[in-house]
Image (cartoon, rainbow, N blue to C red):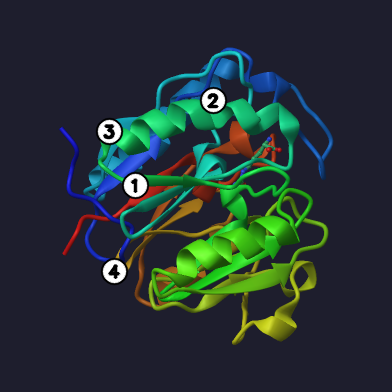
Amino acid sequence: MPENVTAAPGRPGVALVRPPGPRLAEGLVTHIDRRPIDLELARRQHEGYTAALAAAGWRIRQVPPADDLPDAVFVEDTVIVVDGLAVLGRSGAPERRAETAGTERAVRELGLRVARIEEPGTLDGGDVLQVGDTVYVGLSGRTDEEAIRRLSAMLGALGRRVVPVRVAGALHLKSAMTALPDGTLIGMPDLVDVSVLPGLRVAPEPAGSHVVVLGEDHVLLAASAPRTAEMLRADGLRVTVVDIGEFEALEGCVTCLSVLVHDHR
Ligand SMILES: NC(=O)NCCC[C@H](N)C(=O)O
C-alpha cells in the first residue's frame, strides 16, 4: 500500500536506503586517490548509518539492490523528492544511470508521482539542496544547465525557486555545502559560488559541510567532522555521529546514503 508521504519539512517519515553491493570497491572516484575498500566494514558502517536514521524516528525502506552497480549505495543521487513528486535523475556519470530503475520502484511504492530528467540533461541528486522554498542546484561535473532548466520548470509548479550554484573542485553541491535545521548554509566557501547565496557558515573541516537534518534540532554528521560536531553541539543542536569511512573513500558523505521523505502534515 502506498504510504502518505511527501518531502515537505516536518517530522520524520520514510528513509530510502540501498545496502552496498559486492562491487562497491569499483565505485567511481574523481577528486581523490583510490584506496582499497573493506566490504565487510562498509556493510557494518551502512548498518550503523541506517540504525542512526531509525533511532531518530525514520522508517527505513530499502531500495531494491543493484549488485552490478558499484555506486548504487549512494541512493541520494538517483532521485529528488519535493512534496508528492519524485524526480528521477539522469547521472552525469553514464555508469550510474541504471541505478534509477530500483529507485523508481521504491518511490512508486510510496505513492509518489514520478517525473524524470530526460536526455540530454544530466543531474545527480547530490547536487540538489532543498532549504525551505529554495532549491539550490549545483552546476557540477554531474549536473548541467539543461537539467536545471527542466527541474526549475517542474519545481516552479510546486512553488519552489531554483537557484543554480557553480561548484568547482567538489563532486556535488552537497559535497561542498548543506543546511542546518534553521536553514543556515554550512560548507566550504572556496568550492561554491557564494555570490548567489544568502551567506555560508564556514565548516571547520571539509566533512563538516555534510549535514543531514534528522529532526528540528537534530543533525547527523560523519565521524570525520569532530570539530563541526563540537561547534554544532555548542549551538545547542543534538548531533549524532556515524563512521562512514569506507564510503568517504569513494567520495560519498552522510547525505548521499539516503533519501529522506517527510510525512504529510
Ligand atoms: N551525493 C553524493 O555525494 N554521492 C557520492 C557519490 C560517490 C560515487 N563514488 C560517485 O562518484 O558517483
- Give neighbour class at mark 1: few <14, some 14-19, many 20+ (Cα, 10 Å): some
On residue 109, the disc is 3
Identify which residue is drawn at 67% across, 40% down: 91
The residue beneath circle 1 is 113
Q: Name the secondary structure under disc 1.
A: strand
Q: Which of marks 1 and 2 is in front?
A: 1
On residue 216, the disc is 4
Residue type at tag 4? Glu
Q: Is residue 18 above or below residue 38?
A: below
**95 or 208: nearer the eye?**
95
Q: Quadrant of ligand 1?
A: top right
Q: Name the secondary structure under disc 4.
A: loop
Q: Where is residue 160 in the image (x, y as percent from the top left)?
A: 45, 73
Identify which residue is drawn at 68% across, 20% down: 25
The residue beneath circle 2 is 42
Tell whether label 2 touches label 4 (CB within 8 Å): no
Identify which residue is drawn at 25% across, 41% down: 111
Q: Is residue 227 visible to us here?
A: no
Q: Where is residue 113 in the image (x, y as percent from the top left)?
A: 34, 47
**130 or 22: nearer the eye?**
130
**150 or 137: nearer the eye?**
150
Ligand 1 lies under 8 Å from the Cβ of mark 1: no
Q: Name the secondary structure under disc 3.
A: helix
